[in-house]
Image (cartoon, rainbow, N blue to C red):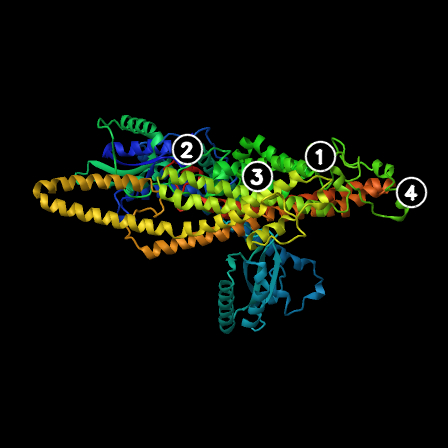
Amino acid sequence: MASIFRSEEMSLRQLFLQVEAAYCCVAELGELGLVQFRDLNVNVNSFQRKFVNEVRRCESLERILRFLENEMEDNVEVVKGEKYPETPLPREMIDMETVLEKLEAELLEANQNQQTLKQNFLELTELKHLLKKTQDFFEAETNLPDDFFSEDTSGLLELRSTPAAAAAKLGFTAGVIKRERMISFERLLWRACRGNIYLRYTEMDTPMEDPVTVGIDPYDPVTSFNSSHMQKDSPSAALAQHIYGKIVEMCCLRFRATVYPCPESATERREMLDGVNTRIEDLNTVITQTESHRQRLLHEAAANLWSWGIKVKKIKAIYHILNCCNIDVTQQCVIAEIWFPVADADRIKRALHQGMERSGSTIAPILTAIHTRMAPPTFNRTNKFTAGFQNIVDAYGVGNYREMNPAPYTIITFPFLFAVMFGDCGHGAVMLGFALWMVINEKSLLAQKSTNEIWNTFFSGRYLILLMGIFSMYTGFIYNDCFSKSFNFFGSSWHIIPMFKNNTWNKDVLLDNIVLQLDPAVPGVYSGNPYPFGIDPIWNVALNKLTFLNSYKMKMSVVIGIVHMIFGVILSLFNHIYFRKYINIVLQFIPEMIFIISLFGYLVFMIIFKWCHFDVHSSQSAPSILIHFINMFLFNYSDTSNAPLYQHQKEVQSFLVIFALIAVPWMLLIKPFILRANHLKAQHMVRDSIHSQAISGNSGGENEVDGQETNHSKKASQGDHSGGHEGHEGDNEEFNFGDIFVHQAIHTIEYCLGCISNTASYLRLWALSLAHAQLSEVLWTMVMHNGLSSSGWAGLIAIFIIFAAFAVLTVAILLVMEGLSAFLHALRLHWVEFQNKFYVGAGYKFSPFSFNHIINGTAEE
């Protein structure tokens, strides 16, 4: 139970494991998740450690698993088990390597074959379209009139048979090019061939997919082209034809155009087209079979991919831990140093015994205690309810070892301070409903494993939001505020009829005055009994509502803030008692309490006294607390306009101010000189001990060794419980009186001025509560009130639209923005005003070796 209010008591032990049993023992500790291993090879390079080859093998397996996962994408569903598989033995890793490497090789071969087949299919498809377009190009001539051809041009086309056809005809090159390159390609061909070229192109009907680049954009079609040049039966014409052909080939190469061989006769083209269609059909069959084989491999891998991934992570984590251990010179023993909670020592011993049995070893692991001056890690046990509050505290700083943990008190104070600034029944109910939905459906929401950071933040704080909603509803009833409107459950304590009976009000007064004021001094106007719970609803319609609420909320904020700070100072007493720093109780805690209670505790007393002492009949003569508090510091009691609160007020206030002033040098001067005296006394005792041991001779030398060992053990035990103020390593720093005095002066000044500034800081409770209430009222008046004021069928329709706008603005502005603002201010009040009274927060977090944390990605680096 004590671990709720303090961090767990930790123990540093040296663990000796047989090499054969080390793997299984570490695996059992990883399943338990309660042991933090220290890295004993900090100065050793990562590539020079003992098990670096095993880690590399695990990384290779992770690479294969990532490859398989990428291949599956969304097409194949990975089968996940209900619970994590057991940690495999080292020999099972070899079998897993064999299976995964074989699966990778088969899948790579299937991918390569599929890519080759698709490449062939692409080429044949392009050739098929090319042959059809080329045939269409040459056959288009048959539809031209006879007078279109002259004697010089009729023989250029193969379908025209004239005597000149034997003398001259067009040679052509056919290919495929991407559409966006076509214009530049055409321009370059025209210029390179000096116009001695005839180019015709057309777009393909079906977009082509490139298997190498995993497909082109389907809206980026490919174009087939035919470039023709003159071909004559003469040496010079043949040379020109050869040159033009080379130019066309170079241009095609430059623009990445694919050139296909195309027969010149129509008969040969038709035969080739038939052959291409036959090959395409065969390729489709082979591609389908290859894809079926590939899917079969992926489904086979999907059945075990999740469990393989868990096993590889566990194996890699185990070897990473073993790399942090030492191995003795005989290579038969693994030596590790571990931190673990003392309360879990039995569970850890059972886990080590199970690891020994699983490995088949007969030598039991050995745990030996280590005396050290290192500050232990801080471990606060949490559950799903307290984890959010502990994270708020740890965000300020991880607590020192065994110092008071603010989280249990934050469970109550944080949502309460938030609710003081956010008090509204309606808004609190909306927040409560959202939190209840997350809490009720937390199992299904956890199973989704969302990667949205904002959603994960809200979900992890669902119980915090739940309490914030409950407390906001409570303070909303205290303020009697629900969407800026009040409830009248018990009936108002104010009545207007006595004002008429007393003849204070009459018909003429009602007609001549827009604003009327109720006089509580008139009998019957105020019943004398306050509203049973919260603020009287009549204040919601009063014009001086803001004045009344300002006074009430400002005093309430001061009372809450001072009580909160005094509670923080009281918690520091428990730290002093636990760490046996009794000098801090007398020279730090007591003067701190005297200072804050004498001044600010007295302010709380005056506020409560005034509330209780003055009623409606004497409220007109009530003195000002602010003026009394100022005159208290000035020792000014000659102000006749401000009557005293009680008898002997002058003597009491003078005594409290002098007592508070005495506490300042009490904190500042006495402690440094006492520490200096203790240091000089310790030095004197050490010198006397050394002198007596020098006289005693050899026998005394033996006693000296024993005495030093005993003293080291005592210092080590003290260092273990020192609270970790000196970091992870305890250092025997030399005493410096100047540093001690300056440190104490800083603490004194910070505390005295902090009491004033922190009290003023709590006024943010009043400011944000006022801002929230006013924003809620403005939103109701300017949006919802207008909708409710509408009449007729148009007003009935408009109310739905206006309510939707009102709901959206309420959630966006008042719940999200105002809620975030109140949350941040409550966070600041806890971190700065409350925790700095007792919480150092200079420790380091306990990071156990846990498979669950590693698999879920929440392991501490």
The kind of residue tagged 4 is: Lys
User: Is 524 positioned to the left or the right of 754 in the image?
Assistant: right
**Residue named by callout 1:** 530
- Is 132 situated above or below 521? below
Q: Earlier in the sequence, mark 2 or mark 1?
A: 2
Q: Nearer the viewer, mark 4 or mark 3?
A: 4
Question: The residue tagged with tag 3: helix, strand or loop?
Answer: helix
Question: The residue tagged with tag 1: helix, strand or loop?
Answer: loop
User: Can you tell which quarter of the image residue 424 is in?
Assistant: top right
Q: Nearer the viewer, mark 2 or mark 4?
A: 4
Circle 4 Cα neighbour tier, 10 Å, few/some/many (<14 / 14–19 / ≥20): few
**Residue named by callout 2:** 3
User: Is 265 positioned to the left or the right of 641 in the image?
Assistant: left
**Residue named by callout 4:** 507
Mark identifier at residue 415: 3
Q: Residue at x 60, y 52 (%)?
A: 637
Q: Earlier in the sequence, mark 2 or mark 3?
A: 2
Q: Earlier in the sequence, mark 2 or mark 4?
A: 2
User: Does the residue at mark 2 contact the one at mark 1 (Cβ under 8 Å)?
Assistant: no
Question: The residue tagged with tag 2: helix, strand or loop?
Answer: helix
- On the image, the x and y values in percent for residue 324 come to 29, 42
Q: Earlier in the sequence, mark 4 or mark 3?
A: 3
Q: Earlier in the sequence, mark 3 or mark 1?
A: 3
Q: Earlier in the sequence, mark 1 or mark 4?
A: 4
